[in-house]
Image: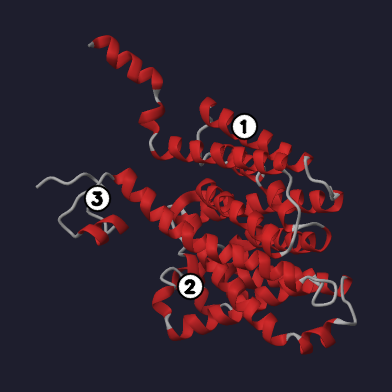
Amino acid sequence: TMVRKGVDEKSPLMILNGPGYAVPEALSKAVGGALLGIIYIGLSASMILFNKALMHEHRFPFPVFLTTLHMAGALVMSLLMRHFAPALFPSASRVFSEPPELDDTDTVDLPLRIMAALKPFGAIAACGAMSLVTSNWAYRVAPVSFLQMVKESHIIIVYTLMVLFGLDTLRFKSTLTLIFVAICSMVAVSAQVSLSIPGLVLQTVCGVFGSLQLVLTNMMMARSGKGKIDPMTMVLCTAPVMLAFLLPANVLFWDPLIPERLHLLWRYIACNMVLAFTLQVTIAVTVRSLSATGFSLASILKDLGIVFAASCVLGEHLTSLQLGGFLGSIVGIGLYSAMKIFPEAFDFSSSTQGSGRK
């Protein structure tokens, strides 16, 4: 029997329906992305609400130090997993044994080899550090619902960068749909009763650096030549570089209360670090599977749940205009997703020409 290209791969639908059942590639990809998105949505929503609770003024309101702990935990857990389960890091040996600027690796000291191997991850790590710090800082000055609604406009930044870096094509219908999403997001933000200018600025800065991190990660994980980077190796290589960027910042933002609060809340902070590492790995897997734009769409799908959770659990007020603008952005994202997964259904010019020939 003849099977379409891509169907022979073990997709989630083939696992559910058996090896002899062939499904359209687009549908299989959509279901696989949805399953991965559900995992990401649950972890990300949990992380956001956990950070919001932890960043309370009377708990652990130290965003730079908390982000540093996240990166230190990610590095330690990655090294432990690399030691006990090296098969999870298939590209790590290539990354560390073939430094990009050193020819004779046998005569080079180990620290220099490691620095040369991690150099390509510097830009990703710098963007990631800025994004995480500003994101955690924003939780101190603005409600979760407000920050999530500002975040909806980040899809425009991601799409623009994807086009500029040659990873996506500029299309009129896609651009129009994303403009509709941005307008709905602005309506939702303008309806915010307690508008937070610091929160708006911090979340916008977070969006720029976070979007750039996603696009650069997408480029590295999809590159050819020296091979693609697997998700676990991506986390292993970016964590120490992020840590190098964050350590000097702790000198500037150090607070004498940090040791006392760390001793008091160490159990919660340890759980927060494990959750942060799990989320980092999930993000890397999602970006590789869905691309940076697809990851942004998955992020927006989770935001509706976060907004309602913040309203119910944290008691944050939502107006009807906020909900209307936010729901409009969700509808726009759904339309954009459908255009990406099923482009033939939205190609009206070709369908008109085909009916004319008949």
- Where residue 353 appears, as percent x and y from the top left, is 32, 14
Q: Which residue is mark 2?
A: 97
Q: Is residue 102 visible in this depiction of the protein?
A: no
Amino acid under disc 1: Phe
Q: Nearer the viewer, residue 228 or 49?
A: 49
Q: Secondary structure at mark 1?
A: helix
| Structural crowding at the residue carrying mark 2, measured as other residues with C-alpha within 10 Å and reported as few (<14), some (14–19) or many (≥20) | some
Amino acid under disc 3: Val
Task: Give the answer, above or below, for where 259 lies relative to 170.
Answer: below
Give the side of residue 134 with respect to residue 292, left or right: right
Amino acid under disc 2: Ser
Q: Which residue is mark 1?
A: 180
Q: Is residue 129 visible in this depiction of the protein?
A: yes
Mark toward the start of the polypeptide (1 vs 2): 2
Q: Which residue is mark 3?
A: 7
Mark 2 or 3, closer to the camera: 3
Question: Of all residues shown, which one is farthest toward the left?
Answer: 1
Question: Of all residues shown, which one is farthest toward the bottom?
Answer: 263
CA–CA distance in space, label 1 to label 2: 48 Å
Residue drawn at 82 percent across, 73 percent down:
250
For the C terminus, the image quarter is: top left
Residue 169's mark? none
- Where residue 272 appears, as percent x and y from the top left, is 65, 76
Residue drawn at 59 percent across, 63 percent down:
44
- Where residue 195 appears, as percent x and y from the top left, is 84, 47
